[in-house]
Amino acid sequence: MRVLVLGATGGTGRFVLTSALAAGHEVTALVRDPAALGDVDGVRVIVGDATSEADVQKAVDGQEAILNALGSRNLRRPVEAESTSVLVPAAVEAGVRRLVVCSAFGVGDTADDAGALPRLFFRTVLGAVYDAKEIADRAVRESPLDWTLAYPTRLVDTPATGRLLTVESFSGTGRVPRADVARFMVDQLGSAEWSRKTVIVSGR
């Protein structure tokens, strides 16, 4: 499958990129700095900005699916809402079929599943980022695309375990390796289980 990866130089996006390649997909990455990708063979690289309409249109052209792991490094200037406002119409116009997004536990309705202290943290330290993600997720849900919104619990850099809990509701806190979340996202390209649904992803 021809797949575009957004956020390919980020913590989770790197695993999404390598997982998509390992699964045999034809992968394109839209990145601002190609040097940040490192030595990854077999990737078509488009240099551009995920908030640029022209760059995103170029990147989505000819794609069958999009794996979006874009995240904000600057907590005061999140990019998720702006990027998604460009991505969704471009994907629809280009005839892209599938969109899988890595959001975050605590965004939107999943905030109700978090404990009181995590909710306070989300609303204060991560308030701007989570607001942007909620706007972005709403745009995805309201689109005609075949989407899946994944809400991972606390992302960690430990090795993949292959043991995931994927549920519609979740109580408390959890943690999950980035590599496992990436593999889950790639697996959704060939699965309808979470088609047009939201899913909380945590480690077991």
Image: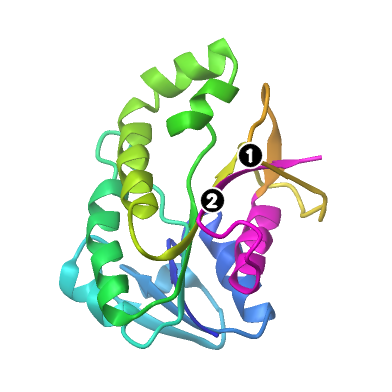
Q: Which residue is mark 1?
A: 168
| On screen, residue 123 above or below 174 | above
**Quadrant where the image shows the N terminus:** bottom right
Judge the density around disc 2: few (<14), some (14-19), many (≥20) Cα neighbours within 10 Å: some
Could you say which quadrant of the image residue 56 lies in? bottom left
On the question of residue 72 being in view, the answer is no
Residue 100 % position (x, y): 50, 61
Rendered residue at 43%/61% (across/down): 7
Rendered residue at 30%/77% (across/down): 47
Q: Which residue is mark 2?
A: 197
Which comes before the other along the chain, label 1 or label 2?
A: 1
**Quadrant where the image shows the C terminus:** top right
Residue 53 % position (x, y): 17, 68
Marks 1 and 2, Cα distance to the nearest angstrom? 9 Å
Q: Nearer the viewer, residue 93 or 150?
A: 93
| On screen, residue 195 above or below 38 | above
Indicate yes or no whether the magenta region holds residue 170.
no
Residue 99 % position (x, y): 46, 65
- Mark 1: which amino acid? Glu
Q: What stretch of residues is rendered in magenta?
A: 178-204
What secondary structure is found at the residue carrying circle 1?
Answer: loop
Indicate yes or no whether the magenta region holds residue 199.
yes
Circle 1/circle 2 CB separation < 8 Å:
yes
Judge the density around disc 1: few (<14), some (14-19), many (≥20) Cα neighbours within 10 Å: few
